Amino acid sequence: MKTPTYSASTNRKANLPLAFLYLLLLFILVCAIWLFSSQTGSDSQALSDRLIHLLHLESLPEIRFLIRKAAHFSVYLVMGILWYLFFDSLGFVAGKAVLGAVLFSLLFAGIDEIHQSFVADRACQFRDVILDEIGAINGTCLAYLLLFQLRTFRHRPHSHLTSKKPLDDYKSESSLQVGL
């Protein structure tokens, strides 16, 4: 019989298959980011322009800048979510899962920007690392809050189900509320 793996810090059972799934999704996301970062500046700009044309936003000034920055934020938001879920599925306490998600996202954002400095017509921009990290922090917080709510709701006693009152008392209360 296989012995379950427990995290020493939370006494929760680690879910290794789920952790592997999150790691696989992170790998796919990192490969996609790396692929987009490997595009030359003109190829990257052409991709942004196609999206702007597809959304019929050509008339808006500075839309290319906004779309590119929104892409940074949203991709790293997803990364923050996935890192948090990965660490949580391994049984890390919430604080360590948040810290791990934020730091690993920051590490990759920095490496990615350095990588872009070696690509033609691209540059390493510190503001992109900051924007990436803001997205990752938001994703990490979102994942934490959603899991906290799910776990709180799941473990909260439902007073109407555990009450010692007879069922007839509930029927009389509901008829009074309706006005019957």
Image (cartoon, rainbow, N blue to C red):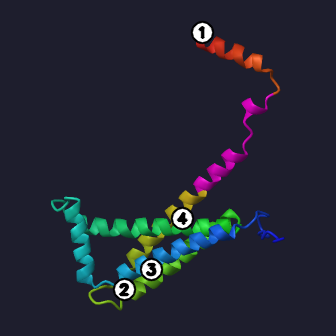
Please state, as top left, top right, bottom left or bottom right, where the N terminus lies in the image: bottom right
Q: Are marks 1 and 3 in contact (CB under 8 Å)?
A: no
- Please name which of the two marks, 3 or 4, marks the residue nearer to the observer: 3
| Residue lying at 80% horizontally and 23% vertically, measured from the top left | 165
The three-letter code of the residue at mark 2 reads Gln
| Residue lying at 41% horizontally and 82% vertically, measured from the top left | 34
| Residue lying at 76% horizontally and 69% vertically, measured from the top left | 7
Mark 3 or mark 4: whose residue is earlier in sequence: 3
Q: Which mark is residue 31?
A: 3
Q: Which mark is residue 179?
A: 1
Q: Which mark is residue 116?
A: 2
Please name the residue that numbered disc 4 is placed on: 81
Residue closer to the observer: 150 or 15: 15
Q: What is the C-alpha distance between the residues marked 3 and 4?
A: 17 Å
Circle 3 sits in a helix, a strand or a loop, which is it?
helix
Vertical position of residue 117 compared to residue 94: above or below? below
